[in-house]
Image: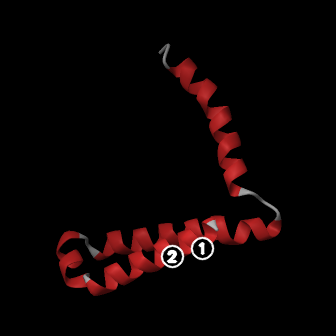
Amino acid sequence: MIRITILLILIIIIFFIILNFKKIKKIISLKHLILSGFFLIIIMFIFLILPRFGINPIAAIQSLIGKILPILGMLRGF
């Protein structure tokens, strides 16, 4: 269900960019558009392809956050 929701959000974003390209062109340069597209491709790769190989990206993110939080407590002392 989450995958379908993410896919629908991506489709809506793509249609919004296509329909409002002239307005967005004034605000966002081509470099920013390419970088945001690359970022969306990476997010799609993480949430659509990795679970097929048995890697759960949500569990990986949760474990990384659990390892980073104690380090942030130590950085507060500096």
Q: What is the quadrant of residue 54 in the picture?
A: bottom right
Q: Which residue does the numbered mark 1 point to in the structure image?
A: 4
**In this picture, residue 23 sits left or right of residue 9:** left
User: How packed is label 2: few (under 14 Cα within 10 Å), some, or many (20 or more)?
Assistant: few
The residue located at (67%, 34%) in the rendering is 66
Which element is circle 2 on? Answer: helix
x and y percent of residue 65 in the render?
Answer: 62, 38
Front residue of 20 and 76: 20
| Gap in angstroms between the C-alphas marked 1 and 2 | 6 Å
Task: Residue 41: give its label.
Answer: none
Please, which residue is most extreme toward the bottom here? 19
Report the amino acid beneath label 1.
Ile
The quarter of the picture where the N terminus appears is bottom right
Please, which residue is most extreme toward the front here? 1
Report the amino acid beneath label 2.
Leu
User: How packed is label 1: few (under 14 Cα within 10 Å), some, or many (20 or more)?
Assistant: few
The residue located at (33%, 86%) in the rendering is 18
Front residue of 8 and 27: 8
The residue located at (44%, 74%) in the rendering is 37
Task: Please say if the residues under marks 1 and 2 sit with CB atoms less than 8 Å apart.
Answer: yes
x and y percent of residue 63 in the render?
Answer: 70, 41
